[in-house]
Image: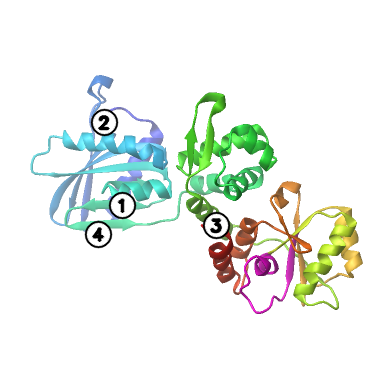
Amino acid sequence: MRAFPASEQQLVEKLLDVLQALPDIRADLVRREPAGAAHDRGYDAEINLRIAAKSLTLLVEAKKTVYPRDVQQALWRIKASSGRSGKPGIGVVPMLAAESLSPGAKELLRAENVGYFDSGGSLYLPVPGAYVYIDKPPPKAQVSAMRSLFSGRRAQAIHTLLMHREQWFGVKELAEQSQVSAATASEVLSELEKFEWIAPRGRGPNKERQLRDPRALLDAWSRQAIDDQPQALQRYFVPGARADALVDRAAQAFDARGASYAVSHEAAAQRYAPFLTSVGQVRCRVLAAPEANDALADLGARAVNEGANFAIIEVKSPGELLLRERVGNAWLASPIHVYLDLLRGEGRAKEMAEHLRQERIGF
């Protein structure tokens, strides 16, 4: 068994603590002297386990981060290790421990009946005669990485991929269409490839990628959106207008002043895929600029704490209005942005989000 870094050793020790805390289970770590590369056993820890009146051996490979694309190689190593473990009469259970395991990696490991553990405390242990499954929130490092992937300029690149899911993108093309730097486009493509959400073709400067699993990518972004802080709203009352008419009045005012905006939430979803009998409030993404303030004055909008029929989500860059669509007289946020905004909403907003996804987005 090779010597492994302190972080991996701590991971194995944490796994041991979790196992020992389970009722009616005894777990003991078997320590061995490091062997040379030629005698690498292919795993990092061996744990003797007593569970359900049976003696078992866990062969654990420890890694830092595991994505779906990493699973196949890890499976080959730990299954090969299990086959040559030399434990007659004792069941051998292969297991992968990592600081963070992506949801897709966990799913693949469960399908192959291979155990796993992550630093957040999630544990899957498929042993004969027993079944141990503990599902905990992902580790903070994984949460932070996902939040970073679905925010700012990176989100613009992902948005473009989802809206043009049939297109093959090189780094340059994605950067241009999503209004981000080539470095950001390259980073996003590399990250998504780890999850196997995109398919590559070609090599070097001619390498291109195409979205292969838009549903999984949007699901991941949806989970992040739901966990985000509520959007900051500037609330107004505009006299003399029902919500549907207010969309057109606001559009006319913003267009006349040259202000950049996109109607979102229920008012936009109702125009993409009607669902509600009526909408009580219009919410717009608006680029912060003097022109927007002038448009609000033209509307006679009055800031209020209660009774608002118009609200603004202030955005800082034109990229946050990317891929908006002109429907009738108004600019609407893209169906993807509207869907994510609805998931952050209240009342029947989430129902409307699922209706929009089914009827307009389609995956």
Labelled pair 3, 1 in contact (Cβ < 8 Å): no
**Residue 26, visible in the rendered structure:** yes
Residue 273, magenta (yes or no) = yes
Q: Which of marks 3 and 1 is in front?
A: 3
Name the N-terminal-most of marks 1 and 2: 2
N-terminal-most mark, 3 or 1: 1
Residue 238 screen position, x and y as percent: 84, 73
* Displayed quadrant of residue 240: bottom right
Q: Which residue is drawn at 65% across and 66% down?
A: 269
State the image coordinates of residue 119 (x, y, percent, origin top left): 41, 46
The residue lying toward the viewer, choosing from 303 and 300, is 300
Quadrant housing the N terminus? top left
Please name whichever residue, 248 or 224, is drawn nearer the observer in this view of the structure.
Answer: 248
Q: Name the residue under label 1.
A: 124
Q: Are marks 3 and 2 in contact (CB under 8 Å)?
A: no
Q: Where is residue 344 in the image (x, y as percent from the top left)?
A: 61, 63
Q: For mark 2, does the 10 Å Cα neighbourhood hold few (<14), some (14 to 19), or many (20 or more) residues?
A: many
**Amino acid carrying mark 4 in the image:** Pro
Q: Which amino acid does label 2 sit on?
A: Gly
- Residue that carries the numbered disc 3 in the rendered image: 222
Give the image quarter of residue 22. Answer: bottom left
Residue 23 disc label? 4
Q: Which of marks 3 and 2 is nearer the N terminus?
A: 2
Q: At label 1, which amino acid type do we have?
A: Tyr
Identify which residue is drawn at 91% across, 65% down: 297
Residue indicated by mark 2: 42
Q: Nearer the viewer, mark 3 or mark 2?
A: 3
Q: Are marks 2 and 4 in contact (CB under 8 Å)?
A: no
Q: What stretch is highlighted in magenta?
A: 265-285
- Closer to the eye: label 2 or 4: 2
Q: Position of residue 249 (x, y in %)?
A: 83, 68
Measure the alpha-carbon separation of dots 2 and 4.
Answer: 30 Å
